[in-house]
Amino acid sequence: MTLAGKQKLEEELENLITVKRKEVVERIKIARSFGDLSENSEYDSAKEEQGFVEGRISTIESMLRNAIIIEETEGESDIVTLGKTVKFVELPDGEEEEYTIVGSAEADPFEGKISNDSPIARALLGRKVEDVVKLTTPGGDMEVRIVSISTAK
């Protein structure tokens, strides 16, 4: 994962532990004060949220424990690698797209971050500017020309 991705996960973990966990415990206390727990939807809802929060904390801790941070190495600034932002144009119509290649834990296609395991990323990895690459996507095959490669923002 990238350093930025690790920092984002650390911030989320900190928020879950210091803020969300306390909020949920407080909701459970308040719901218990209403009495009969068997028909207490507030209590059920708070317990369900507690399970989600604790599960997410566990997941993030595991991800951080097993994370390998990607650092840019000298001499590879012109090659598509994990952590790089790649801009390419579709051939022949010239529609331009830009993606940052990240580890699967950080992937968020809506923010332009694709997993290194995705078909597009696998085809782009190891390529250079001006390379023409054939991409296989769920929508079909296409050819693209790499316009630029930069360090992830």
Image (cartoon, rainbow, N blue to C red):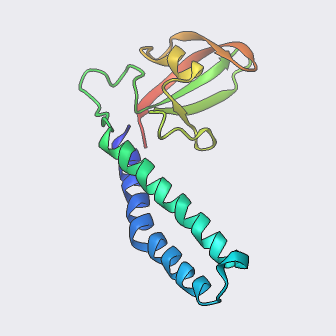
Placement of the C terminus among the 4 image quadrants? top left
Residue drawn at x 36%, y 52% is: 7
Front residue (pair 78, 72): 72
Front residue (pair 57, 73): 57
Residue drawn at x 37%, y 45% is: 62
Examine the rendered structure and indicate whether residue 79 appears above or below residue 83: above
Q: Is residue 45 left or right of residue 62?
A: right
Residue drawn at x 49%, y 54% is: 55
Placement of the N terminus among the 4 image quadrants? top left
Q: Is residue 9 left or right of residue 31?
A: left
Return the x and y of residue 2 as percentages of the image width and height. 37, 39
Return the x and y of residue 75 as percentages of the image width and height. 26, 21
Front residue (pair 92, 43): 43
Residue furthest left in the image? 74
Residue 78 sits in which quadrant? top left
Residue 92 visible in image: no
Residue 73 visible in image: yes
Return the x and y of residue 13 as percentages of the image width and height. 40, 59
Return the x and y of residue 151 as percentages of the image width and height. 38, 35
Q: Is residue 65 left or right of residue 87?
A: left
